[in-house]
Image (cartoon, grey):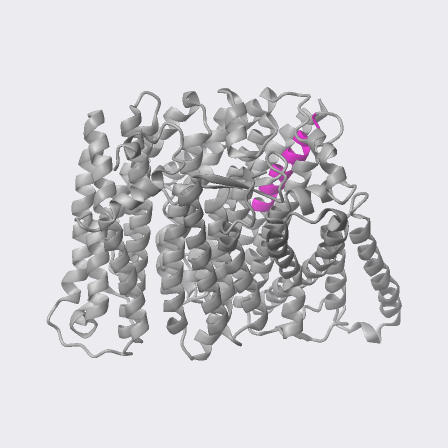
Amino acid sequence: MTVTIYSMAAIALFVLGLYGLWWQPHLLRKLVSLNIASAGAFLLMVALAFRGGDPDPVPHALVLTGIVISVSATAFAVVLAARRYRETGAVELDDPEERP
Amino acid sequence: MTGWTLGPEAGLVGFPALGAVVLAITAARGRRLVVGLTLAATLVALVMTLTRLLSVGAYEQDIGGWGAPLGIGWRIDGFAVLMLGLSVAVGIAVSIYSLAYFGDEPGDRRRALFFWPLWFFLWSALHGLFLSRDLFNWYVTLELSGLAAVALIALSGRADALTGSLRYLLLALAASLLYLLGVVVLYSATGSLDLAQVAARLTPGPVALAAILLITAGLVVKSALFPAHFWLPSAHASAPSPVSAVLSALVVKGGFYILARTMTGLWPAAVADGVLLGLGWLGGAAVLWGSLLAIRQQHLKLVIAYSTVAQLGYLFMAFPFWMEGVGEQVASRAWAGAAYQAVSHGLAKAALFLAAGVLIHARGRDDLDALRGLGAHLPVTATAMALAGISLMGIPPGAGFLPKWMMMTAAIQEGRILPIVVLITGGLLAVGYLFRIFRRLLAADDVVLAHPPPRILELAALGLAILSIVTGLSSLPILSLLRIGAPEGFAAYLESVP
Amino acid sequence: MNTFIQRCLHGGVIAVLAGLAILLARAVLALDPEGRGLADTVSAAIPDSGVLHPLTAVLLNFRGYDTLLEIAVLLVAVLAVWSLEPPVAPCARVLQEPAHRNPVLLVGLGVMVPMIAMTAGYFVWVGAYRPGGAFQGGALLGAIGVMLASTGVLPSSIHRTIRVRLAVAAGFLVFLLVALLTAGGSGTLLTYPKPWAGLVILAIETALALSIGVSLALLFMAAADRATVHREDAP
């Protein structure tokens, strides 16, 4: 039962994150949404690892790998977005009022 | 555990990674030496891997000696080595080109400082991807290659490159998450991440359905299949030219490679058939849509980038022939055709982008009209473009002819009209967009070159273009290479090749 | 008309995402509720792994190759961030006044930094027996970097000297060299020689923790610095 509750919450987080990634125009909000979606994916992995009583260590190791990748990609994306803001003044991907 | 010691294929991942980390530490000092050693060592590793494959047949390596499901495994067969060969060939040409491409201006020096480690990490990750048979390891190699690719695009520093790379990064990350969730569901159901073990334990049902949809959707975005292609043209066209070559020739093939591996060896037929058919339809649409948009572009690299969208479509047109109920002869012909097309497109497209880099360098502009009359000044580059173009248009003896012909005969045997129409129309449209380039190159206008390009740039492009013709002429060795360890149910046609 | 199309698109995306959620939920509910995955296989192989904690065994031994590539991802992220930046990165400073003019902060840092460093070292060491390891230790080291940068203790700019580059790359380099050497010695990549497996893992973990810590701190500085620029020239 516990596993089911956590799994359903994880799926909800994942879908909400994807929705935010598509719907939010501001790049920082897109990045936050993406991280919510990853949190959902990682939560699902940890929840499913708990099914048989004592937890299965393999998904835990996979989550740790996923977190490091997610941190690296997020840091790069933040700096990339900031650099683009400096060059163009745009904070959205399809910004109509980009500074020349 | 295998009885073999010291797999040479480890060098294909290890040597570029070692070169990358050394260049990251030493920066510009001794760069030519490190690059040269890395290229030589990687080439030797490829030759040794090929030699071993030819002597023992397809083989597997368990990293750390643990074996699946505990450890990670590699599978070295004809398909893997063919893709590795493509990657090494394109990689060596691009590396030689890049040594001259990044010049002595301060901006170029800074770019070169980061180009080399990022590119060698990308190269290493792609080799890891082609060797792997572990679903989670594929996720890691996809992320490593994707992140390095985005950084390489942004290297040009242009505003459109920053936008293009950022869009690519966000989409690629979302796509990886879809793929990852598919893998998680599969692991939870089967207790393994090894392709063969998961396949053996997977039964049709909600788990298989969710997994195939998630994994396929993620990889479709990564390999830029229509309608998820929209990130590709701006990203590939705005990158520095050697980077464009790598992206179009190799990086998008990574997604296709995993898709082909999973489609031929993972899913129960009951869930796979609908997906295979859908991918075929999307592939056909990509051929037509990409070609039409390529004809409308006004910039050289955008024409070539949209041509990538179109040429990738051919790869997916082979998928419906892998459905249940199609004869093994036809399925096998379509499978080999897709693998062959991946290689021939990779070589021709890399040559085309490298040649485009020479032309843009020479004129300092990248609109199509800047090309007028350049053919007389840069005959070597014009020849490289013509040879690569022959391959892309699917004219014999270019390497693009045979794969399309193999798919055509598969479609004829199955009595499918639509693929035949798309194949012929796609070829004609390719003639259309490529002649917009050739016509201007061969115009009799008198132009003055802004910067005469270094000779080595032209030669690297020509080398790849010649290789793409050679690949077209040596179909028998390639098909017999693909026969080694061909997936079950895809060998019949290859067995009949002498 | 335009808004109508937008509304349809919006509805379509919501429908697709709802479909995705249902698809996933059905798959999760169809899983064996008692599935144990590889828990037993891992426990059985622990005695051969050189460590006692299953998570460390999976990360550094059974699936060590994944971890090697993952450190490469972190290294690529640092290189990627650097490629967008001028060669000298000003340190992000949150406080107006540098710490050495603030006695309370100075004493606080003097107590906390050594304690965090010690905890980080303990985490790396204890990873062999219980929860801990290079990532936890590295994250703590990264936190020290963040503290020193934001209180202005670190110099006002960090040059990418060879020492900084070495510190960032050390984890990957050590891990990769071990991988290549084991390939030469034992025949298969990343097969550690039995009696020394624990020691080799500890050596890798120490180098990894150092690199992870330095990388995380540098990533923070790059991102935080840009955030300052963002504030200053925003209209």
* Above or below: residue B153 compared with residue C35: below
Q: Which residues are magenta?
A: A34-51
**Left or right of C227, for residue B441:** left
User: x, y percentage for residue B474?
Assistant: 25, 49
Residue C84 placement (x, y as % from top left): 52, 66
Which quadrant of the structure image shows residue C73? bottom right
Q: At 54% from the left edge and 24% from the top edge, which residue is drawn?
A: B201
Query: Is A36 colored magenta in this rendering?
Result: yes
Asked if one can make out residue A93 in the rendered structure from this viewpoint, the answer is no
Above or below: residue B327 compared with residue A41: above
On the rendered structure, is B77 left or right of C54? left
Residue A4's x, y, as percent?
A: 67, 25
Residue B346's place in the image compared with B353, above or below, is above
Give the camera-side residue of B129 and B353: B129
Query: Magenta stretch containing residue B335, yes or no?
Result: no
From this viewpoint, is residue B94 visible?
Answer: yes
